[in-house]
Every structure is written in C-alpha cells, then in structure tokens.
Amino acid sequence: MNDVKRVALLTAGGLAPCLSSAVGGLIERYTEIAPDIDIIAYIGGYKGLLKGEYIRITDEVRENARFLHNHGGSPIGNSRVKLTNVADCIKRGLVKDGNPLEVAAKQLSKDGVDVLHTVGGDDTNTTAADLAAYLAGNGYNLTVVGLPKTIDNDVYPIKQSLGAFTAAEQSAVYFRNVVSEHSANPRMLIIHEVMGRNCGWLTAMTAKEYRNMIKMENFVPEIGLSQKKIDVHAVFIPENAIDIEAEAARLKHIMDEIDCVNIFISEGAGVDAIVKQMEENGQEIIRDAFGHIKLDTVNPGKWFGEQFAKMLGAEKVLIQKSGYYARATAANARDLSLIKSCTDLAVDCALKRQGGVIGHDEEDKNILKAIDFKRIAGGKPFDSNVSWYRDMLKEIGQLG
C-alpha cells in the first residue's frame, strides 16, 4: 500500500540541459499515476530546504508541466550547498548554528515530506547521500531519490548523466560561429575552453559533434574557405598528459600552412601544473564549499593560450568558453528520451520507498535502476582509449 502523501523536488549545483525537463517529467509522472500525492518544490536547492522556502505544485502547473521540457535552466532555482560543511552554512546564513543535516531533516519533517527528489551532479547526490544516511540513522521515515545531472558525465557508476548529450551538441554549435573569427586576423590562435573539471568526456564529445557537423558542409578551398581552417587541430583533456613543446612544434606547422590553429581544451586540463606555478608565485588558490578549486580563478584557457601563442608565433589569441551557453539550453531529443526513462523510474521507486540515484549502472550490465547512494561518487574519468576518440585524434594528426 502506498504511504506517500507528499513529495518534494529540488535542483542543485551548476546548470545542465535537463533540470527544467526533469522537474517537468517528475510532475507529469506523479500526475499520471498518483495524482493525489501533493508536490512541493524547494526554491534554490538545499538553500531553500534549509530556509523552508518552497512552492506548491498547483493544478495549473501540473497541466502545463509539459512546457518545462522546452526550457533550459531550472524553474525552481539552484544553489551550491554542502550540508556537512557546517562553517560554510553558518557563514552564508543558511543556519544559525548546529548541524545543517539536522536542520534539513527537521524542515522536511515539518513540511510533511515523505519523498525528496534531488536533481544534481555528484556533489548534489553525495550531499543527498549524507542526508539520506542522517534521516535513516535518526528515525525519519523519508526516502531520497536522486537523478544524475552533470554535463561532465563523470559520476560513478552512471553510464550517462542527464544533460551531457545536449551540452556537447550545443558546445559544438557555439564553436561553429566562433571559428569564423580565424578570418579576422592573420596567424589566429583560437582556444575553445569546454567545461570539465576532472573529466574530458564533454570536450572529446564536443569535438566529435563539431567535426561531424562540419563534415556535412560544403567548402570553396580555392578562395580560402577550407574545412581544414575550421577543423579541430588539437584536443587536450585532464586524462592525458600534455607535451606542450611537441604539440607546439606540430601546431606551428599547421599555423604556417593555413594561418590559424583551433584548440579544444577541458577547463581542468593541466590544472595541476598551473596551480603549482601559481603557488610558487605566492598566489592564493580559491576553493568552493566542496573544496574544489574555482577554475575561473585559475583560467586554464588563458594559461595555455599564453604558452602556445609564443611557441606558434600567433599574432592574436582568442579564448572562448562555451560552458554557460551550453549548460543553460533546453534538452535535445536524445536527452529528453533519457530524462523521461529516468523520471518515470524515479517516481516508481519513490512509491515503493526505494531510495538511490536513478541511472544506467555501468557495473551491472548498464541496467537502469536505483543505485545505492553509497556507490555514487564524482570524478569518473573519460576513457581516452575508446576507439572513436583515438580515431578522431589520428584524423587531426594528434595521435600517430
């Protein structure tokens, strides 16, 4: 017998092209199979939970939930909050004192929530895991069901995170316009910095999507409009060491031949070397509430641009970041299909009081199921030995 009377939704962490659709999908599924269950949504992720700020999902919202699939961002707002980082929560005024986990648990109890749906990446879901463990260990009869959101596609043991397909596609679309800047100046070096702190999947897939896109186009090389000028000439990801001198020598030949070079780089590539240099120079390394280095303060794209500009004899360097463009878009058809299968199962599991994170389990034949929170972790690397990636590097001359 179903004992679920009220469920709560929250989205957290950075944006991804799935949040609005995931919220819509959950509302649609509950409305379809359990319309009597009350739904609320905490505003601004865990911040809203700690502050007790939420909105009720009305009949009008249920009726129009389908429109959420057409939008990017999150209709209910996000924030980056780690419930086990007591000092940070107090500093930000999210709690007055004490344990944020306890504050969250009491708020959920006060709000009469039976099931909490979290939509977020590894930080969101590890925080959800902390909360689920606290609830279970302190007598709260509440189930937490998570959905994996991250454009980095780097969550163990999830085969494919929601929104990553779309982010790669949109990052490719973004660069298709940017690349034409090569004609604005002689010896132009264009750096396309793609999101991806520890995982190069998004950068690699973006390059693949982009190259598939331009292969479908027509060119007039006799007048200078050639595929080679707008192609990807190098891809750098965190998983592979970068021999800057060797790559510079290779890329200089390309620069001398076609008067431009285009590099795709993950925002986390080479960070260890950059941080080491910054520390040696006495510069402060700024970190967020989760202990992650704030990459915008490190600026890998700028650093690599400076290194390669000198070695290639570039006359101008253009550094462009596609992250905010790509992560805030609406989900594409491929992601919409994945989102629907996950939100449908999330509701089914919630009604059975089966907690966990919904995803295809790479360690269990890629079966779609609720994966125990204890098995969820971030930082899953991209397998740079997969055939499609190696074939691409061979095509662009980066791999012999």
Image (tube, helix red, strand yellow):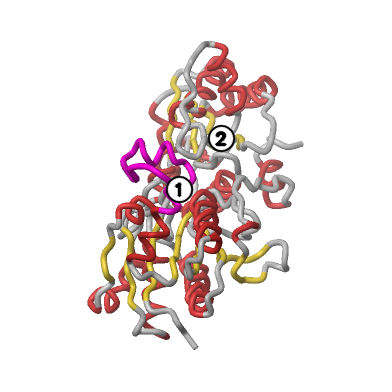
In the rendered structure, find residue 83 and report the number of the disc placed on it: 1
Q: Nearer the viewer, residue 215 or 91?
A: 91
Measured as percent of width and height from the top left, residue 315 is found at: 46, 18
Check disc 2: other Cα within 10 Å, few if <14, some if 14-19, many if 20+.
many
Q: Mark 2 points at which residue?
A: 268
Split into 4 quadrants, where in the image is the C terminus? top right
Q: Which residue is drawn at 52% across and 57% down?
A: 134
Q: Which residue is drawn at 61% across and 45% down?
A: 379
* The stretch drawn in magenta includes residue 145: no
In the rendered structure, find residue 178 and report the number of the disc placed on it: none
Q: Vertical placement of 348 versus 134: above or below? A: below
Q: Vertical placement of 264 versus 251: above or below? A: below
Give the magenta-colored segment's residue range.
83-102
Q: Which of 321 and 84 is in front in this view?
A: 84
- Identify the secondary structure beneath mark 1: loop
- Callout 1 amino acid: Leu
Farthest residue in the top direction?
Answer: 281
Relative placement, left or right, of 23 versus 391 is left
Check disc 1: other Cα within 10 Å, few if <14, some if 14-19, many if 20+.
many
Q: Vertical placement of 36 versus 398: above or below? A: below
